[in-house]
Amino acid sequence: MDKDKGSGSFSFTENEQINRLLSKLVSDVKGFTESQLDQIRRLTQIGSALSAEKRLDRLLEMIVDEAREFTSADGGTLYIMSDDETELQFAIVQNDTLNVRMGGTGGKITWPSVRLRNPDGSPNHANVSAYAALTGQVVNIGDVYHAEGFNFEGTRKFDAETGYRSKSMLVVPLCNHENDIIGVLQLINARFSITNEVISFSIENQKMTESLASQAAVALSNNRLIQDLENLLEAFIKTIAMTIDEKSPYTGGHVRRVSELTMAIAEKINNATEGPFANVSFNDDRLKELRISAWLHDVGKITTPEYIIDKAKKLQTIYDRIETLKMRFEILKRDYVIEALKKKLADRDDAGEEKVDGYEAYLEELKKEFDFLVDVNTGSTFMDEQLMEKLQKVSSRKWVMNGLTQNLAGNDEFDNLSIPQGTLTIEEKEIIRNHVTVTYKMLSQLPFPKKFRSVSGYASFHHERLDGEGYPFGLKGADIPLQARIIALADIFDALTAKDRPYKKEKTLSEALAIMRSMVEANHIDGELFDLFIKERIYLDYAQKELTPRQIDMR
């Protein structure tokens, strides 16, 4: 039964209608809340995924992929701010309708960047992406063909060329933790999920996209910061290595060459599908660790005196003391003439060196002895017993200085000239060997990231030998990591073929490889690595880049 409307009461029919409306409202609110919760969960998942992605190219793609899926956008573009903050550079371009995926893992986009300033220096507010980057404001446009305040001539031209119809657009700046704009995310043509009709970007989607942009900016900033720190670390390491090389004009480039050769060997190992290295693979972090180790393998030479590193001749210290011996030979010539003239009481007006009895023969004798010392001083002649006897005889020749009679070559000079082969004494070799110990001491004190924790070992073990007779730790066989064996092989090959060493003549390819083969047979270096070095002709790729044509005597 109905009651009077004037009484202020509702009829049963009206109550039923109100209840239905309330029920629908509750249902809508519940559905809306669940939708919001789903979006929040999705944002959380996206944030975790963005934070976990380490590759910058994949991270950039993921930002656009997730934003497009989130908003049902047909296309998306991600711009990255240039280092000098004068332009926006294309990083990612995607469009489903046009089947376009550019940038990221697909390679760099070569389209011209968007300038943030006009030629007269005024801000480029006509371009919507530049406007967002300059002001930090979000731009949400229902139809770009009817938008005011922006210049969409480029968009219209693109549509005319492709047959596309750009309509709705959402442009969101990416702002990092320091409130700097680091990029711009531009989405185009939101689509209704059922009919696929192009619609405007809703306020809800705009807000959620802003949240996504914030997470993306954090992830992108962190990724770039980590990459920048790693780049700084590698650049600093290379600078230190080059500084050590520059200590000596004769070893400049050695560290670079060893590093490049090391990585060439590692690349061939990664590509191996058969043989002992078929199951060996270096991932990106392991490759970086190996490259850093190779660049630092001689860092201990920072403490090695230059005259030892540069010791081209046996008598060399700060200068080559063969010049001192040459001066003593000149004094011997002078004293011989003086003594001869005194004995003969010759007429000083007519006497001359050419008239002194036996002078020419004596001069020839001294010349031969000096030439002998010059040859011995080079270090290229092996000092056998016969040569040692001759050196003893020449060194024992007497000369007089300030009334003091002494041997032509002093004890230190004789000891250096007596070096059996090469230019270094036993003491100097120990100083050279010590650079590896110093390398280990220096690197083991550095707080390398966990993924680079083996750098000190790999860099310091390149003079170890498989037979355990190497230094500084006397490691043997499997105790020497593969990475250290690779650096050792690269170091030896470069040392044998280097054309900038004053104390030895560079080897040809055939000579160098023959010596290395003998080192394999003597169990000094890794035979499997050497076989790979030969089979893959790594030596030839290196030779064509670094060696002289004369050295390349094999293919």
Image (cartoon, grey):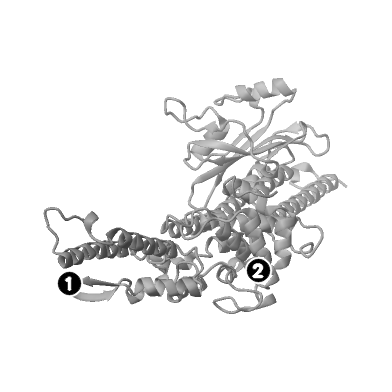
Mark seen at residue 374: none
Depth check, front residue: 54 or 388: 388
Question: Number of numbered discs present?
Answer: 2
- Name the residue type under label 1: Asn
Q: Position of residue 234 (x, y in %)?
A: 53, 57
Secondary structure category for the residue under label 1: loop
What is the quadrant of residue 206 in the picture?
Answer: top right
Depth check, front residue: 542 or 26: 542
- In the image, residue 72 sits, relative to residue 293, either above or below, namely above
Depth check, front residue: 326 or 34: 326
Q: Position of residue 420 (x, y in %)?
A: 49, 72
Residue 475 appears left or right of 357: right
Is residue 441 among what the camera can see?
A: no
- In the image, residue 53 sits, relative to residue 11, either above or below, namely below
- Name the residue type under label 2: Met
Mark 2 residue crowding within 10 angstroms, few (<14) / some (14–19) / many (20+): some
| Residue at 88% over, 47% down | 1
| Residue at 62% over, 50% down | 543
The residue where tag 1 is placed is 402
| Residue at 66% over, 30% down | 142
The residue where tag 2 is placed is 519
In the rendered image, the residue lying farthest to the right is 1
Q: CA distance from mark 1 to mark 2?
A: 53 Å
Secondary structure category for the residue under label 2: helix
Mark 1 residue crowding within 10 angstroms, few (<14) / some (14–19) / many (20+): few
Which numbered disc, 1 or 2, marks the residue closer to the eye? 1
Q: Position of residue 342 (x, y in %)?
A: 15, 66
Depth check, front residue: 458 or 331: 331
Q: Position of residue 51 (x, y in %)?
A: 64, 57
Is residue 372 among what the camera can see?
A: yes
Q: Earlier in the sequence, mark 1 or mark 2?
A: 1
What is the quadrant of residue 283 in the picture?
Answer: bottom right
